[in-house]
Amino acid sequence: MNAGSRACLGEYDFERIAAHARRRYVEGVETVELIRRARSQREREEIVLVCMLDIEDDQVRYLDLCCRHASRCRVYDCRRRLRALIEADLQAHRAR
């Protein structure tokens, strides 16, 4: 995990979260199926973070993040980065 990823969402790895986001939004795998296939609690937590992309930023501000890493969370920066990554992947996918 690189240093930029580590500061992203507390102790979560941005690249792993991005991989889940690609499966969800680019490949179209349903959230419930991703969670069902998860092999660990950490993987399920990462998938839930991806699902939060469906919630508008203004609504997320009102959520009380009770994650064990919330004090080090930069959720808004990561949401912006994930959305940009997914949009680029979707455009590339559509161009094929």
Image: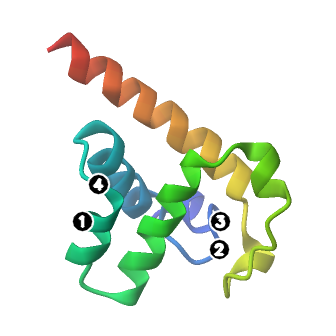
Residue where numbered disc 1 is placed: 33
* Spatial separation of the CA atoms under disc 4 and disc 3: 28 Å
Which type of secondary structure does the marked residue at label 1 adopt?
Answer: helix
Q: Is residue 68 above or below residue 86?
A: below
Would residue 9 appear left or right of 39 to someone viewing this image? right
Q: Position of residue 65 (x, y in %)?
A: 75, 74
Q: Earlier in the sequence, mark 1 or mark 2?
A: 2
- Name the residue beneath numbered marker 4: 30
Colour theme: rainbow
Please report contact status of discs 3 and 2: CB closer than 8 Å, yes or no.
no
Name the front one of labels 3 and 1: 1
Relative side of 76 to 46, left or right: right
Quadrant (top left/top right/bottom left/bottom right) for the N terminus? bottom left
Residue flagged by tag 2: what amino acid is it?
Gly
Q: Nearer the viewer, mark 4 or mark 2?
A: 4
Q: Amino acid at mark 1?
A: Glu
Query: Which residue is found at the position 55% from the left and 46% from the top?
Result: 54
**In this rendering, the label closer to the viewer, 3 or 2:** 2
Q: Mark 2 — residue?
A: 10
Q: Mark 1 and mark 4 in contact? Answer it, CB < 8 Å.
A: yes
Residue furthest out toward the right: 62
Pointer 1 local density, CA inside 10 Å: few below 14, some 14–19, many at least 20: few
Q: Quadrant of the C terminus?
A: top left
Q: CA distance from mark 4 to mark 2?
A: 25 Å
